[in-house]
Image (cartoon, rainbow, N blue to C red):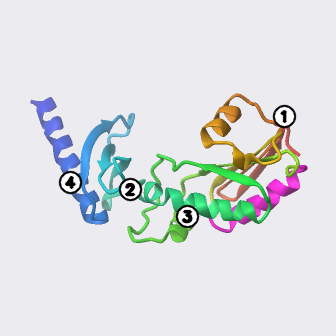
Amino acid sequence: MAKESASGGQTTLKNDTLLYLQGRYDDSFVYEKTEDTGFNPSEHTFCFSSNLLQGRKVRVRVSETSGGRKYSDNYLALKYEAEIRKLFLECAEQVFDDVYIIYTASDAIPYEVIQADASVKNYLKQTDVTQYIFAVVSGEELQSIDAVRKMSDMIASVTKNYQLTVVAFEESSVLQLEEAELKRRISEGLYVSSGVITNVKGVLDEHWNDGGSR
């Protein structure tokens, strides 16, 4: 009987979460799965596929708090993925002439509740989810960490939490390569140099080439 009651509670919560999504985003969703949230009985995470986002998987965290039920989700991250990449590219192009940005929206769920109609710029300013950005350039353009720092400053003007990795290839122009090829080379370590700057909650950390801080 206890198991049946728990199952019924999960079904009700799942249905309530679906109604929350539909009302918040004026989209239609299909339930995919319930995720294991570990040992916190006051938190539940559900996954739904979105119609307007071509089946992308939207994750929703439901928290039971003393002030009532709280919902948070990653819908806006998926919705604005292309626009966010464009913003980061604009930042990069202020530093590098020949640059390609690799960016994929994180499936992490923000703890901050962001307005459903927030603009892409307001979303980036408010979200507490770290943005992972790869900027691919030619070896000629990446001569020092100073260029990476400058791009980091540009990105800091549009979002508060990010990890920026700048990777240099031997080609004089990286724009001639397909993104799949860029990703393959990065995953296999086939680059001549790289710089990484992480800025999370105002704490800066930077590394260059072999991982030693400079």
In the rendered structure, find residue 202 and report the number of the disc placed on it: none
Horizontal relation, residue 119 to residue 178: left or right: left
Q: Is residue 144 visible?
A: yes
Q: Which residues are magenta?
A: 143-159
Mark 2 and mark 4 residues within 8 Å of each other at the beta carbon? no
Write down the residue under mark 3. 124
Question: Which residue is depicted at the point 32% across and 57% down?
Answer: 52
Rate crowding at label 4 as few (under 14), some (14 to 19) or many (20 or more) other CA atoms within 10 Å: few
Magenta part, dominant SS: helix
Element under disc 2: strand
Closer to us: mark 2 or mark 1?
Answer: 1
Residue 102 position, x and y percent, is 63, 48
Q: Amino acid at mark 3?
A: Leu
* Coordinates of residue 77 in the picture (x, y in percent): 47, 56
Magenta segment includes 210:
no
Pointer 2: what residue?
72
In the image, is residue 75 above or below residue 115?
Answer: above
Measure how far apart labels 4 and 1 are at the Cα level: 49 Å
Inter-mark Cα distance, 3 to 4: 27 Å
Can the viewer see residue 159 in this picture?
no
Q: Which residue is mark 4?
A: 16
The disc at residue 210 is 1
In the structure shown, which secondary structural element does the residue marked by tag 4 occupy? Answer: helix
